[in-house]
Image: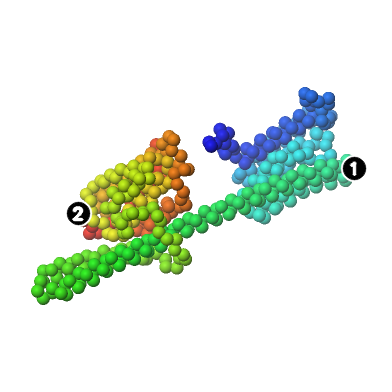
Amino acid sequence: MSATPSAPFLKRVTPGGWAALAWLAGLLFTALLRVRLPGQETADILAGVVFLRWDGLTMLAVATALALRGSVLLTRRPAAALRYLLAAAVVASTPLSVTAIPFAQYLAVDVALYVVAAARPPRDALRALLLALGVLVGHLTIRLLAGWSVGTTSGLAVGLIAAVAWLLGRSEGQTRRYAERSRVQAAEQAVIAERLRIAREMHDTVAHSIGIVALQAGAARRVMETQPEQVRQALTEIETASRETLAGLRRMLGALRTDEPGDPGARPAGAGLPEMPGLAALDRLVESTAAAGVRVAVRRVGAPRTLPPDIDLSAFRVVQESVTNVVRHSGADACTVTVDQRDPDTVVVTVEDRGPVPGRDPARTGGGSGYGLAGMRERVALLHGEFAAAPRPGGGFRVTARLPLPSGVTAR
């Protein structure tokens, strides 16, 4: 079901705007109580003699100015804003001939209490509540000491509503803080999961390289006396594999921690792909993504080069995660993968889509934690690369990873 047209407007109204609207609504309600509306024999409350005089209207105007000033300050200086609103409530109650500050004059104060309780530390929130209740008690006490009639029950009702607004704000603040902690923890867990995944992949890469070294060394030992040329070739391959493995280990192991708890396990997004894929496996990724309803166009720029295993794998993982996000979250039916190898010192991979197509609901294309970007950023950072992910100016989303290459990487 689509959102109602008023929802965007409601989201754009600031807390100060809500306080100003509450004050104006209170003024309107106060005026309506003092006039005879259709269907009534008399007004609910008789207008006090001061209410209709110039001095009464002047006090209402001054109170409105104080309330609007407090509304403007509510976001930047909530404590000062609350004092302005409390002063406005007291001033506006004076020409009404009432025995206590009415609820209508405290509506804006209730909004301010909610905002302060939701956004400020507990000590500031409690101080705001005590100040608001203290003004009510002080108003009643002054009337009592002056020998005037006192609306004790009306004051208690207004104070109770103010306390309820404060409690609702506290609940909202606790919910926000819990959501923020959960978001931070989920992002940290995504980084940990990505590091563990990198560690597993690095373990497999090293095991593969050591296996090659062992095979080549065994072959060289068997033919070292009869075929010296093959021995020379085997030693060259051993040296190349060893250097690449050591270089990858230096790039990764210095940044990876070994004390992270738990093992989230591998993500299922790469099912059906080789166990240790690289950019050469993009065609397989295109096929599996097409089966999910998203067309992937692969564009290669520059002369292909043989990349170090860790960089090749990380570039592929960035593409894989980005394409998975397109399938699950974007609502797009196509995306473009660009592998740019024109710069001899870097390899750049870019994944971008044009945004959702009509009739395709992004919210129904799949689940996901929403923290894949954190894992990609961590993976690229471990290789001292640059990562960017942001909406495209014309719609859609773009992910770019720039990975530096060690010296000695040559074209195929």
Q: How far, Cα to Cα, is label 1 from label 2?
A: 99 Å
Type of the residue with mark 1: Gly
Closest to the observer: 309 or 385? 309
Identified at 74% across, 32% down, the residue is 29
Depth check: 191 or 143 in front? Answer: 191
Q: Quadrant of residue 39?
A: top right
The front one of 341 and 297 is 297
Q: Earlier in the sequence, mark 1 or mark 2?
A: 1
What is the number of the mark on residue 74? none
User: How busy is the neighbourhood of tag 2: few (under 14 within 10 Å), some, or many (20 plus)?
Assistant: few
Q: Is residue 223 above or below residue 291?
A: below
Residue 32 picture location, percent across and down: 76, 29
Quadrant of the image containing the C terminus = bottom left
Residue 131, given in percent of the width and then of the height, sits at 73, 49
Mark 1: give few (<14), some (14-19) or many (20+) Cα within 10 Å.
Answer: few
Q: Is residue 385 left or right of residue 138?
A: left
The residue carrying mark 1 is: 147
Q: Residue at x 73, y 42 (%)?
A: 86
Q: Is residue 116 visible?
A: no
Q: Amino acid at mark 2?
A: Arg
Q: Residue at x 47, y 66 (%)?
A: 261
Q: Is residue 271 left or right of residue 125?
A: left
Any mark on residue 412, and which?
2
Locate residue 119, reporting x and y percent.
62, 49
Q: Secondary structure at mark 1?
A: loop
Give the residue at x 40% y 59%.
266
| Residue 133 appearing in the image | yes
